[in-house]
Image: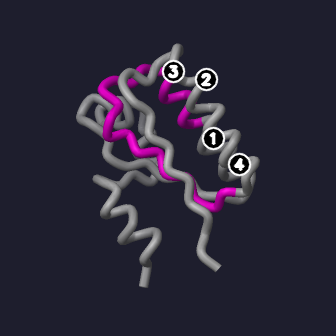
């Protein structure tokens, strides 16, 4: 059976005003027994600490439900935030969705 994949694509600035929507989408994915959650950050132009915190909570939530969470398509500002906080060692991050598909969805 194929794993259930949910792709979440936040847009714009991922800060305190946007994180509630992200949390709701993660909760919906966990409730729906999603196996793999991909957060595609291609359209996120800026992220602050509350956005990063929401991603950490999302990771814990998905993992505790037995799923896996991945990120892809992060821009330079987000990449710097992840490196400064060492979150680049916590999250599995792919350069783009095609590489995620190749590594996770089509492993053979």
* Residue at image location 24% in from the left, 34% down from the top: 76
Q: Position of residue 61 (x, y in %)?
A: 69, 43
Q: Are marks 1 and 3 in contact (CB under 8 Å)?
A: no
Q: CA distance from mark 4 to mark 3?
A: 19 Å
- The quarter in which the N terminus is drawn is bottom right
In-image side of 57 versus 81 (left or right): right
Q: CA distance from mark 1 to mark 3?
A: 13 Å
Would you identify the image quadrant in which residue 81 lies?
top left
Looking at marks 1 and 2 on the same chain, the residue that comes earlier in the sequence is marked by: 2
Q: Are marks 1 and 4 in contact (CB under 8 Å)?
A: yes
Looking at marks 1 and 3 on the same chain, the residue that comes earlier in the sequence is marked by: 3
List the residue tagged with mark 3: 18
Residue 69 to residue 101: above or below: above
Segment colored magenta? 34-56
Question: What kind of element bears circle 1?
Answer: helix
Q: CA distance from mark 1 to mark 4?
A: 6 Å
List the residue tagged with mark 4: 30
- Tell whether position 50 is magenta: yes
Q: Residue 20 shows which numbered tag? A: 2
Q: Nearer the viewer, residue 12 or 69?
A: 12
Residue 44 to residue 71: above or below: above
Residue 33 to residue 79: above or below: below
* Residue at image location 39% in from the left, 24% down from the top: 47
């Amino acid at each position: 059976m194929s794993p259930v994949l949910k792709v979440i694509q936040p847009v714009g600035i991922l800060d305190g005003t946007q994180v509630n929507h992200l949390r709701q989408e993660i909760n919906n994915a966990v409730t729906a027994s999603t196996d793999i959650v991909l957060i595609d950050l291609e359209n996120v132009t800026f992220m602050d600490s509350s956005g990063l915190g929401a991603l950490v909570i999302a990771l814990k939530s998905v993992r505790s439900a037995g799923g896996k969470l991945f990120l892809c398509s992060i821009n330079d500002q987000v990449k710097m935030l992840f490196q400064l906080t060492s979150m680049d060692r916590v999250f599995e991050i792919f350069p783009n969705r095609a590489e995620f598909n190749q590594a996770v969805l089509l492993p053979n």
